[in-house]
Amino acid sequence: MSAIVAAGLVKRYADGARRVEAVAGVDLEIAAGTLVVLEGPSGSGKTTLLGLLGAMIAPTAGSVAILGEDVTHLRDHHRAALRRAHVGFVFQDLSLIGAMRVLENVLLPLVPRGGARPDERARAIALLERFGLGGERDARASRLSGGQRQRAAIARALVTAPEILLLDEPTAHLDGANAGGLVDALCALRDEGTTIVAATHDARLARDARVDRALTMRDGALVP
């Protein structure tokens, strides 16, 4: 089964008087339950492609299907509902709110649903325990180290139990030990059935033997 299918995917942006083609005709099929890495330098289009694959942004041309449902022409609120139900995101800046407690940050994706039910709160706590942050759940997010912040962001992305997890530069600014631990965690999630796509310029992740598929982007296109 395919988790994500993209066909002829194009995204153009206006940059003053110029039109920039950030993604240029990408065809891509990602099998469910696999760990896929999009490798490429800054400006290659991998972050934009990640947003397209996760229905964060709409394409200029082409199509995207998530878990068999074409999301290309959905209205914004329908696309957002599908995304909240099936896709977890970890952004490069992590987007944790420093003044809030770690557990509160993890529970944030449940706010649009009316807040966390008792079972969802228990899931959030279990995720923090899984990622070695059980003792930090009442700490302010601003007090976490870089590696802890990354793990907290992943826990937040997983609190809705999505089938698909998308990460932008997940090992950026992590030392060797923390980067290795993060890859271990991603592989464990993959082995449990989560489909994972990570955009990176870090060879430690892109060249890891446990990655199912590594793709390279240049100038908005996948390199054959």
Image (tube, rainbow, N blue to C red):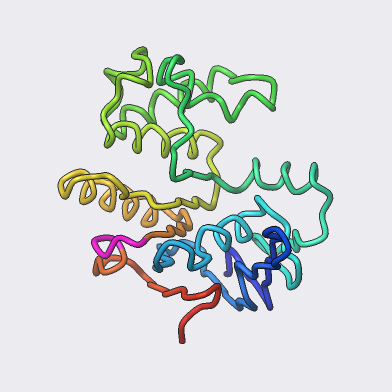
Residue furthest out toward the left? 177
Instruction: Compare residues 19 and 105 and report the one nearer the observer.
Output: 19
Identify the residue at image location x=75%, y=66%.
Answer: 60
Tell me residue 65's x, y (percent): 69, 65
Position of residue 59 in the picture relative to residue 163 (left or right): right
How many numbered discs sit on the rendered protein?
0
**Which residue is painted at 65% across and 41% down in the image?**
84
Residue at image point 62% right, 76% down: 24
Q: Which residues are magenta?
A: 201-205
In the image, residue 22 sits, relative to residue 180, either above or below, namely below
Image coordinates of residue 41 in percent, x first then y, are 39, 66
Quarter holding residue 140:
top left
Q: Could you tell me which quadrant the N terminus lies in?
A: bottom right
Q: Is 111 a magenta residue? A: no
Q: Residue furthest front?
A: 17
**Which of the 4 image quadrants contains residue 113?**
top right
Left or right of 162? Residue 83 is: right
**Residue 105 picture location, percent across and down:** 48, 23
- Position above or below: 185 against 117: below
Q: From the viewer's side, name the closer residue of 79 and 224.
A: 224
Considering the whole magenta stretch, tell me its main secondary structure. Answer: helix
Q: Where residue 180 appears, x then y in whole percent?
A: 21, 51
Q: Residue at x 42, y 75 (%)?
A: 216
